[in-house]
Amino acid sequence: MTTNLRLPGRPEEITLPALLTRNAAEHGDLPALSWRAGRDCADWATLTWSEVRHKVAVLASGYAALGVERGEHVLMMMGNRPEHWLSDLALVHLGAVPVTVYGTSAPEQIAHIARHSRARVAVVEGARELLRWEPLLADATVPLERLVVAEAADAGGHSTYASLHASGARLHRADAFEKAWQETRPEDPLTVVYTSGTTGDPKGVRLTHRNLMLQAIRLDRHVDLPEHAEHLCYLPFAHIAERVLGIYLPLLRAAHVRLCADPTAVAGAVRELHPVQFFGVPRVWEKLAASVRAVLAQLPEDRRTAIEAANDLARARAGHLEGGEEAPAALEASYAAAKEQVLDPLLRLAGLDRLVWTASATAPMPIDVVRFWAGWGITIMDAWGLTETAGVCTVNSPAGFRLGSVGRPIEGLELRLAEDGEILTRGATVFGGYLRPDGTVESASDDEGWFPTGDVGRLDEDGFLWLTDRKKELIITSNGKNVSPALVENTVKEHPLIGQALVHGDGRSYLVALLVLDPELAPVWAAARGIEASSPAELAAHPEIREEIARAVEAANARLNRTEQIKRYRLLTGEWGPDSGELTPSLKLRRRVIRDKYRALIDGLYEEPYEEPDAAP
């Protein structure tokens, strides 16, 4: 357990404002929130916990002056900046419900959320956001009445965050602020998180103080960190993972949040800060691994050989720990020497040398990526959960883990598998239901409280959960065979040239795939072989690259059963991302979007009949 701090009440009765009150009173001088500031954003500005609470009180008065009332939804579209973090807490202290909207959301998604939430006020960052939000003020079907703009230079005729803060400072009354937050009850909504919408319109997941405070307390028991540890906060607050890790857990731990406004700058921040903990969705860990592999590929052979030997020792040690046993003394000694002499100097350059807790969630982690990091002494504690479960349901921890699994259930949460393998869950951290347009809540659980997660998996004899796929994403071939696309995709992505993959075959007799060249490793791989190419398209067209991709697909197929094998594929050059629409903001594949975008290519893979070769004798 990380924190031994006093809890301001019984776990199931704690509210977020009670935690901030405790932090200001008992840990007031400790750093709470830092962000880039100063000339060229080269310096860090910091607020202590007592300063945070004062800012929150002032902002709460400012929002009250705008007419924000208890129970009302307030929308926010800003990056990871102090105005966002502090406004979230201020609204909660008023009894209002902060709702963060992904910055990559399309205008129609924003309109849907604004209409569905019935919000009258939205707080946005600047000119880029105003282009999508201003038209809603004139839309009679949308209740939105007012925009507050963080960047004063872009505000035009709208209210600014600075003016809101100024009015709050002028009107603040301590007694009214204290009375407002003390009226908050554990069953009151703390936030509504709109799912990122891999299919259809986003749904509003209503989560209470009790849901999220219990989530934070129970998750904290699985993590052993120094008191008041720093958290590098770079994922969007519209994602449940960053809400828990970047807001609710730091309030519980009286920890120090470092805001990283630009997610692409996270590697630089890690190099600077040398954090003790780091969370990344699978794609983040894949990208980091690709960067390390690219560097290693350029090292002299004798240096690579020494690193690979150290990697083997680290993986052997991890294998013993995974089995719940201590590594043999000789192995432990060899690993310690290799870590000090070979691994740590390289990890130090990347800022990864102080890590004691690393984790991932949101989608199955490719096992080759997990094994890669295990070779550096970094055990990624994969977890699994949903927005609807207030975060994690299952988690690996140093006290018990299986690489490739997503761990065992957290305290107070039950799991069972339906006949078709779908994972069902119930417990106090499971949400009460989806928000309806009239403000009521529609339960999504059955009469016994079981919530169908939509994920398919299996439980092993030790209680560890292994994910198979999303139920709605399972491919059913024309032969009636069920295929997990994630399994096939992760297998073919084990080759470093392949950065992304999508498998298709629903209602077809065989599988085809779209493969995307890894934009970082492909040029390195090519340069090492004397291949000259000035663009990704030239790389993808080069015969040696194409031959290597063919060998990669063949190697993946050798590990898959016949139904799971990729029969035909197309190699693409442009990386998929949230801005181009192929990925959700949490970096999951938007399968329908990709299939629609590349429909002609996919159909072309099926134009000529495919004849299965004779089975080997």
Image: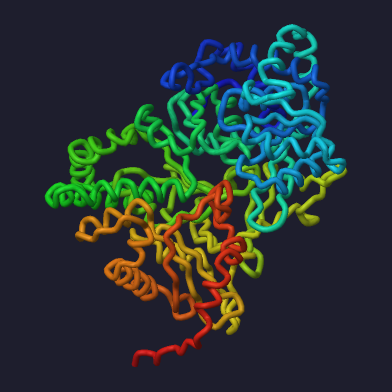
Using the image as rendered, state which of residue 31 and residue 85 is in the foreground. Answer: 85
Question: Is residue 67 visible from the viewing direction of this image?
Answer: yes
- Left or right placement of residue 77 versus residue 493 in this view: right
* Nearest to the observer: residue 608 or residue 451: 608
**Tell me, what colour scheme is on the image?**
rainbow
Is 573 situated left or right of 155 in this image?
A: left
Q: Residue at x 52, y 67 (%)?
A: 485
Instruction: Tell me where residue 491 appears, x and y as whole percent.
Output: 41, 65
Residue at 55% x, 27% y is 250
State the residue at coordinates (86%, 43%).
141
Q: How many marks?
A: 0
Residue nearest the observer in this picture, 179 or 204: 204
Q: Position of residue 262 (x, y in %)?
A: 49, 34
| Location of residue 595 with respect to 261 vertically, above or below | below
Name above or below for residue 608 compared with residue 395. Answer: below
Q: Which percent across, then down, holds residue 171?
A: 77, 8
Q: Residue furthest left?
A: 302
Q: Residue 377 sits in which quadrant?
A: top left
Picture quarter with the C terminus: bottom left
Image spot of residue 75 (x, y percent): 72, 34
